[in-house]
Image: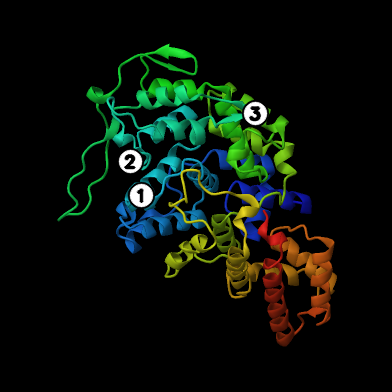
Amino acid sequence: MAGSNDVALMAHLLRRAGFSASRDEIEAAAARGYDTVVEELLNPGESSGVEDDLMLRYHPTYNHAGAIEINIQNWVYRMVNTEYQLKEKIALFWHMIFCAGHSKIDSGEEMGLMIQMFRDQGMGNFRDLLMKLSTSPAMVYYLDNCESHKTNINENYGRELLELFSMGVGMNEDFNYSEDDVKACARAFTGWNIAPPYPPFPYGRSPWEFRYDPADHDDDEKTFLGNTGNWNGDDILEMIAANRATARFISRHMYNFFVADEVPVPSWRQTPPKDEGLLEDLEQAYFDSGYNITAMLNTLFNSDSFKNAQYAKVKNPAEMVAGTLRMVGDHRGEIKPGMFELSQEPKYMGMDLMNPPTVEGWHTGHEWIDSGTLVERINFAADYLGRTDLPGVQSMISKLMAQGDNLSPEQFVDSCADLVGCLNLTEDTRDQLITHAGRSGNLTHGSDAERAEFERRSGEMFQIIASTSEFQFE
């Protein structure tokens, strides 16, 4: 049987490598062992991870959803229900780096296809992922490469590919590339365009298709990162993938997303990383594996730095919504009304999925929280954790009752905090919760009336815990 430390570590792993889990799932995973679960997460199956036949039955446009809201709804449903949690988490990871938004693309289906590309390719070879990104019609349009021609260069994609998608501006006060490199990069990607789509009327939009036009490609000699030749876009991607700055850039993003909150990306050139040792290990895994993302994740999840970083980062809105639903067991294993409204909740908390504010994406950490978004976060989590009819909440209450016929306020508070994610409450928070629980005395469940009161007080305590600062972290 797994001990309390094993359960706490497993809860940490499932929060970071997925979108949390119910207490029963956490305990079952802890019993299988940390190493076993890491292997399961890193090696997802070939299926979609959700019941596609049910999605098609209830959402006939599931495979070709034109509306952005339907694509967002489908994605949040996947976050809550997929058996391949890391595969879905990595899709969110890349969406927060390779930022493109519906506000310009204006095609829900193309945004859905981009997320599917992250889902399918996001744990594989980074160079191959960059190729998929560079030939994504949505990204070609979003960053204006369709407006870049050998006689009239548009630098948008070349600049963002280097600055925000692969290498970063620099580190240790040094720069990773020059303005001439940006120009050479943009020239290499001329001719990478989109095939003209059919008119949307009267039959609706046709799928976008990438098209390479050799007649529009700049065939002149180019010098990029010190290398001179008649480079095309794929040559540029090969040089980027082989560059040590790229390994550092990906490693630092992984640290910020999976381990602990970092400063925003624009500050990385001037601000050293929090854990140089872990980043060096991740960089080594990147090169040793031939740019393989799964190898880097394996190094990360098995590191002491990761294991010791419990509650070192603020939950992003998608994690808050999907994690809460998975914990309480709502909208799991069934398709019912209400998912559309739930899928909009991250937007109210500051994360408009599939529509980042800029190509730089969202600033993370404490910047997720302000006076408005905090209210949304608390209200959402408290509402669900207070619903004692939900299966996940019912299970937690049953576990509380199984601890004895008579629980003191101290036992009650400590057990509730443990069940709601093995929280590390500060002494001040714990004292206040105990004071509140003590006003109603010990908890018993010998009679129907006592059991009803036990349930009520449990739901209330779960709600209060959801309103603490500790609950905002994962």
Of 191 and 424, which appears nearest the observer?
A: 191
How far is disc 1 from disc 2 in space, using C-alphas?
Answer: 9 Å
Is residue 401 visible to the viewer in this orientation of the structure?
yes
Q: Quadrant of residue 196?
A: top left
Per the image, the residue denoted by label 3 is 173
Mark 2, secondary structure of its residue: helix
Of 227 and 306, which appears nearest the observer?
A: 227
Looking at the image, is 10 positioned above or below residue 215?
below
**Residue 108 x, y percent position in the rendering:** 34, 53
Binning the other alpha carbons within 10 Å of mark 1 as few (below 14), some (14 to 19) or many (20 upward) gives few
Per the image, the residue denoted by label 2 is 141
**Residue 236 x, y percent position in the rendering:** 42, 22
Per the image, the residue denoted by label 1 is 104
State the residue lying farthest toward the left: 202
Q: Name the residue type under label 2.
A: Tyr
- Asked whether the beta carbons under mark 1 and mark 2 sit within 8 Å of each other, the answer is yes
